[in-house]
Amino acid sequence: MALAYIILIVVLGVIALLGVGGLFLLRPTARRRFPQRETRAVPGQEADTRGGTAGTDTLERAREATLPPAVPTQEAPPAPPPAAPPAPPVAPPAPPVEKPPPSAGRMVRLRARLARSQSGFGSALLTLLSRDRLDDETWDEIEEVLITADVGVSPSRTIVEDLRTKVKVEGARTPEEVRQMLRTELLAQVETAASRVLRTQRHEGRPAVLMMVGVNGTGKTTTCGKLARALVGDGQSVLLGAADTFRAAAADQLQTWGQRVGAETVRSDREGADPASVAYEAVSQGIEAEVDAVLIDTAGRLHTKAGLMDELGKVKRVIEKRTAVDEVLLVLDATTGQNGLRQARVFAEVVNVSGIVLTKLDGTAKGGIVIAVQRELGVPVKLVGLGEGPDDLAPFDPATFVDAILGG
Ligand code: GDP
C-alpha cells in the first residue's frame, strides 16, 4: 500500500513537471508569431516582450534550432513601416528656351485662317452686289449683312450709301469691278489716320513700357506672352510684370510664357498683392536690367465695378512715377460683339487706350468689329489674335484683312 502511495506521488510529480515544461515549450512559438514587432520594439518595451529568465532563453534557443522559421499570420499583420517624410515640392523643370520666329509677315501667314472665318460675310456681300438689279431691298440686305458682321449701324449705313453712289456713277459692273469697288470701300472704313506702329523700342536710358488691359478671359495674359515671344523673335530683350495678382494662375501662365523665350517675370509671391506695386517693381527691374521692353499684364475684373477700374488707373499712375507708359493696349475678344464695345468704352474712360488688340478673330465671322471698335474709341487695332498657338498674334494689316474678307 505504501508502495502504491509512493508510485502515485512519483506519477503526479512527473505529470506536474511535464505540465510546467509544456508551458515553457509553448511560449517561444507565440513570440515568433510577431517577429516584426520584436525587431521594431520601442526601447523600454523590449523587456516585456522577452519577459523571460535565463532558463526560458535556453529553452527558446533549443526550440529555435528545431522549429521552422515562423511566418507572420493574417490575424495580426506586421506594423506598417514608418511613413517617409514628405518629399519637398519639386519645381517643374523650366521649359527649354525657344527661338521664336520674327513678327514680320505674320498677318499674311495667318491670312488663310482669317479668310476661313471671315469670307462668309465677304462672299455674301459680293453675291448681293453682283445682282443685275440693285433695288432698295437688295441694299437693305447688304446693310443687314454688314450689321450682322458687327460693322456697326452707322458705319454700315455709310458703306451702303457710298456703294450706291458708286454703282449709280459707274453703271454696269463685271464681277471683278464689284469686288474692287467693295474692297476700296471696306479699306476706307478699316484704315485710320492714327499710326498702327506698336511702340516697343527702347528709349534713351529706359525700356518701352506696355500695359495690357481688358476684361477677364479676353486673352490679356496670352497676348502678353505671345507679344513677348514676338519681340524676342525680333531680337529684343523683354521683362514681364504679372500685375494680375488676383489669379495666381495668371502669374504662373505668364511666367511659363516668359520661360519659354528666356524672359524674366516679376510677380508677387502671394495672391491679392497690390497690383500697382508689382507693376512698379517690374518697371524698376526693367530699368535696372536695361531691357528693351517691359510688358505688364493687369487684372481684368468687370468694368461695372467702378473701384476696381480705378485700380487700373492707379497701376498706370504708379508706373508713371518711375517712367512713361508707351502703350496701353485694350484687349478685346472679337467674339463678344456689342458687349465688347461697351467694355471698350468704359476702359477708355479709365485709362488712355493707345491701341486695340482684337483676339479670337479666328473664332468669329464678325470681323466687322474692327471697323466698329476703331470708330468707337478713335484708336487703331494694332494687333490681332488668330489662334491659340504661340505665334498666332500678328500686327494688324488692313489690306490683308480686307482681302481675307473678300476671299482673295
Ligand atoms: P485673360 O483672362 O484676359 O488673361 O485671358 P487669357 O489670356 O487667359 O485667355 C483666355 C482664353 O482665350 C485662353 O484659353 C486663350 O488660349 C484664348 N485665346 C486668347 N487669344 C486667342 C486667340 O486669338 N484665338 C483663340 N482661338 N483663342 C485665344
Image (cartoon, grey):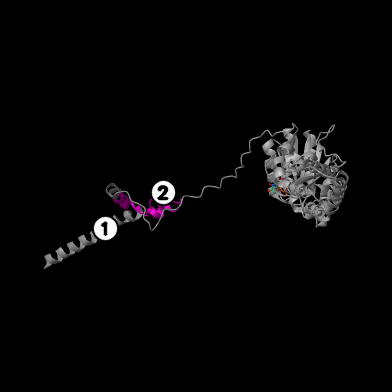
Q: Quadrant of residue 13?
A: bottom left
Give x and y (percent) for residue 253.
68, 45
Q: Is residue 280 visible?
A: no
Q: For mark 2, what is the residue?
A: 39
Contact (Cβ within 8 Å) of mark 2 with mark 1: no
| Magenta residues, start to end | 32-60
50 or 320: nearer the viewer: 320
Calculate the distance from the C-alpha at mark 2 to the C-alpha at mark 1.
26 Å
Residue at figure coordinates x 71%, y 47% from the top left:
117
> Horizontal placement of 211 versus 14: left or right?
right
299 or 385: nearer the viewer: 385
Q: Quadrant of residue 22?
A: bottom left
Q: Which quadrant is the C terminus positioned in?
A: top right
> Horizontal placement of 34 versus 385: left or right?
left
Residue at figure coordinates x 82%, y 47% from the top left:
371
Q: For mark 1, what is the residue?
A: 22
Asked if the magenta segment contains residue 56, the reply would be: yes
Amino acid at the residue labelled 1: Gly
Amino acid at the residue labelled 2: Thr
Q: Is residue 407 visible?
A: yes
Label 2 CA crowd tier, 10 Å (few <14, some 14–19, many 20+): few
Label 1 CA crowd tier, 10 Å (few <14, some 14–19, many 20+): few
Asked if the magenta segment contains residue 53, the reply would be: yes
Residue at figure coordinates x 40%, y 50% from the top left:
36
SS at mark 1?
Answer: helix
> Dominant secondary structure of the magenta stretch?
helix
388 or 284: nearer the viewer: 388
Give x and y (percent) for residue 245.
74, 49
